[in-house]
Image (cartoon, helix red, strand yellow):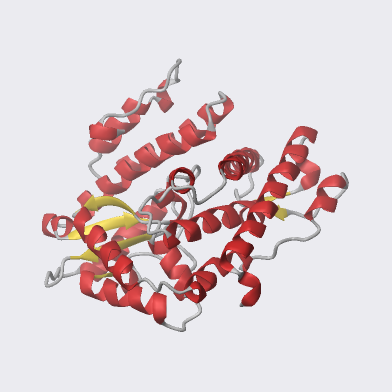
C-alpha cells in the first residue's frame, strides 16, 4: 500500500472486503468505534482471500499494510501532534515482520526524541493499549507494550537498554533484543529507530559466544521429539503447537543469521533472500525453509478459521486427528525441513558448546 494507496487484488471481491473501501474507512475514522468496524472487515478479508486461494504471503502483505494504516490512524487520534512528531511508534513480532494474519497479542514500542517531554504520556499509552484491545489485539502477556515504561523511552534510554540486552546477564535480554530487531515503523520520526539500530551495530558483540547465546532461543520451546509418530498415528488427539514446533525455530534461526550479518531487513523472506544473495545460506535450504514457513502460516490460518467457526478461541494448537491426509503429510514434510534447519543453526552457532 505504498504511497497511501490500497493495493488492488485481481478478481472480484465482496464489498465488505474491498481493500480501498477499508483503507478509506480507516483514513476517515473519527474514533475507536469507527476503527473497530475496519478491524472487523480486515478479519473478514483474510478469511475471504484465504478461501479464494490467494498465496499466504500476499495475504500477510495486505493485512500488514492495512493494520499499519489502522494503528497509525489510532495513534493520530489519541496522541497530540507534538508526540507524533517527536516519537517513533513501532510494531514488533509477527506484525513487525509482515507475517501477521489474524490479530495477535500487542507488540509495540515508542522511541522518543531526547529532551522531549509529553505531559500525560502514561495516560496516552494506557488509552492506546486499551483501544488496541477493543480492536481485537489482546494485551501482550509479556508486557511488550507502550504501557510498560521499558518500551516507551527516549532514544538515549533505548540505547542503554540495547547495551544491557547485549552485554547484561538478564535471561530475558536476548529475547528482548530479538523482539526489538523486528521493529517496523508505524508512525512518527523513523530516524529515531534508525539511530537506535545504528547504535546496536556499533555495540553488537562480535564474539561467537554472544551470537550462540542469542541463537540458542530456538531451544526455548519443547521440540516435541515425538511429533513424527503423532502425525502417523491417526487416532492421536494430543495437540501440536505450530508456533513452538515450526514457525518460531524458522523465524528466530533466520533472525539470528541476519543479526550476525547486520542485516536491517525485518521480514523472514527478505532476510533469507539477502542471506542467499551474500552466499551465506544454501539457496535450496533457504527455499525449503521459506516454503515450510508459508505452509505453516497457511495451516495455522486454516485451523484458526475453523476454530472461529466452531466458536473456539483461535490459537497455535492443532490436533493431528483433525487434519486431512494431505495436511498431515505436508506438515510432516515441513517439520522435517524445520528439523534440518535447526541442525544448521546448531552447527553455525556451535550451540552444543554452550
**Is 222 placed left or right of 84 in the picture?**
right
Q: Residue furthest bottom?
A: 169
Residue 323 seen anywhere in this rendered image of the structure? no
Residue at the spot x=22%, y=42% of the render?
30
Tell me if residue 25 comes above or below residue 225 in the rendering: above
Looking at the picture, how far across and down is residue 73, in whole percent? 25, 45
Q: Quadrant of the N terminus?
A: top left
**Is 143 placed left or right of 226 in the picture?**
left
Viewer-nearest residue: 168 or 323: 168
Viewer-nearest residue: 266 or 273: 273
Viewer-nearest residue: 231 or 19: 231
Q: Residue furthest top?
A: 12
Looking at the picture, how far across and down is residue 86, in whole percent? 14, 60
Q: Residue furthest front?
A: 279
Looking at the picture, how far across and down is residue 315, in whole percent? 61, 51
Residue 64 seen anywhere in this rendered image of the structure? yes
Q: How many numbered dots are placed on residues in this image?
A: 0
Residue at the spot x=19%, y=69% of the render?
120
Viewer-nearest residue: 327 or 73: 327
Residue at the spot x=30%, y=41% of the render?
69
Tell me if residue 35 comes above or below residue 50 in the rendering: below
Residue at the spot x=49%, y=69% of the render?
211
Looking at the picture, how far across and down is residue 163, in whole percent? 34, 77
Q: Quadrant of the C terminus?
A: bottom right
Amino acid at each position: 500500500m505504498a504511497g497511501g494507496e490500497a493495493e488492488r487484488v485481481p478478481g472480484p471481491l465482496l464489498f465488505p472486503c474491498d481493500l480501498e473501501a477499508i483503507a478509506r474507512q480507516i483514513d476517515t475514522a473519527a474514533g475507536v468505534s469507527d476503527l473497530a468496524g475496519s478491524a472487523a472487515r480486515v478479519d473478514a478479508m483474510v478469511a475471504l482471500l484465504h478461501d479464494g486461494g490467494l498465496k499466504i504471503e500476499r495475504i500477510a502483505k495486505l493485512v500488514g499494510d492495512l493494520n499499519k494504516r489502522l494503528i497509525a490512524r489510532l495513534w493520530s487520534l489519541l496522541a497530540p501532534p507534538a508526540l507524533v512528531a517527536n516519537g517513533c511508534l513501532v510494531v514488533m513480532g509477527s506484525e513487525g515482520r509482515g507475517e501477521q494474519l489474524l490479530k495477535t497479542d500487542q507488540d509495540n514500542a515508542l522511541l522518543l526524541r531526547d529532551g522531549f517531554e509529553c505531559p500525560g504520556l502514561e495516560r496516552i499509552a494506557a488509552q492506546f493499549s486499551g483501544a488496541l484491545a477493543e480492536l481485537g489485539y489482546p494485551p501482550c502477556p509479556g508486557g511488550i507494550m507502550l504501557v510498560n515504561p521499558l518500551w516507551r523511552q527516549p532514544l538515549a534510554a533505548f540505547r542503554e537498554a540495547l547495551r544491557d540486552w547485549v552485554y547484561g546477564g538478564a535471561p530475558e535480554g536476548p529475547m528482548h533484543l530479538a523482539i526489538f530487531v523486528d521493529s517496523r515503523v508505524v508512525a512518527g520520526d523513523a530516524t529515531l529507530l534508525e539511530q537506535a539500530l545504528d547504535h546496536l551495530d556499533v555495540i553488537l558483540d562480535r564474539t561467537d559466544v554472544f551470537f550462540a547465546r542469542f541463537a540458542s532461543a530456538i531451544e526455548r520451546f519443547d521440540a516435541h521429539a515425538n511429533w513424527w509418530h503423532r502425525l502417523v498415528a491417526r487416532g492421536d488427539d494430543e495437540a501440536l503447537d505450530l508456533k513452538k514446533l515450526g514457525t518460531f525455530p524458522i523465524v528466530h534461526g533466520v533472525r539470528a543469521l541476519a543479526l550476525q550479518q547486520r542485516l536491517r531487513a525485518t521480514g523472514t523472506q527478505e532476510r533469507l533472500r539477502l542471506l542467499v544473495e551474500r552466499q551465506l545460506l544454501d539457496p535450496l535450504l533457504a527455499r525449503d525453509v521459506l516454503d515450510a514457513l508459508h505452509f505453516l502460516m497457511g495451516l495455522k490460518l486454516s485451523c484458526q478459521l475453523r476454530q472461529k467457526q466452531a466458536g473456539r478461541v483461535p490459537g497455535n494448537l492443532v490436533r493431528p486427528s483433525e487434519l486431512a491426509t494431505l495436511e498431515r503429510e505436508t506438515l510432516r514434510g515441513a517439520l522435517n525441513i524445520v528439523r534440518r534447519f535447526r541442525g544448521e543453526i546448531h552447527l553455525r552457532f556451535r550451540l552444543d558448546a554452550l
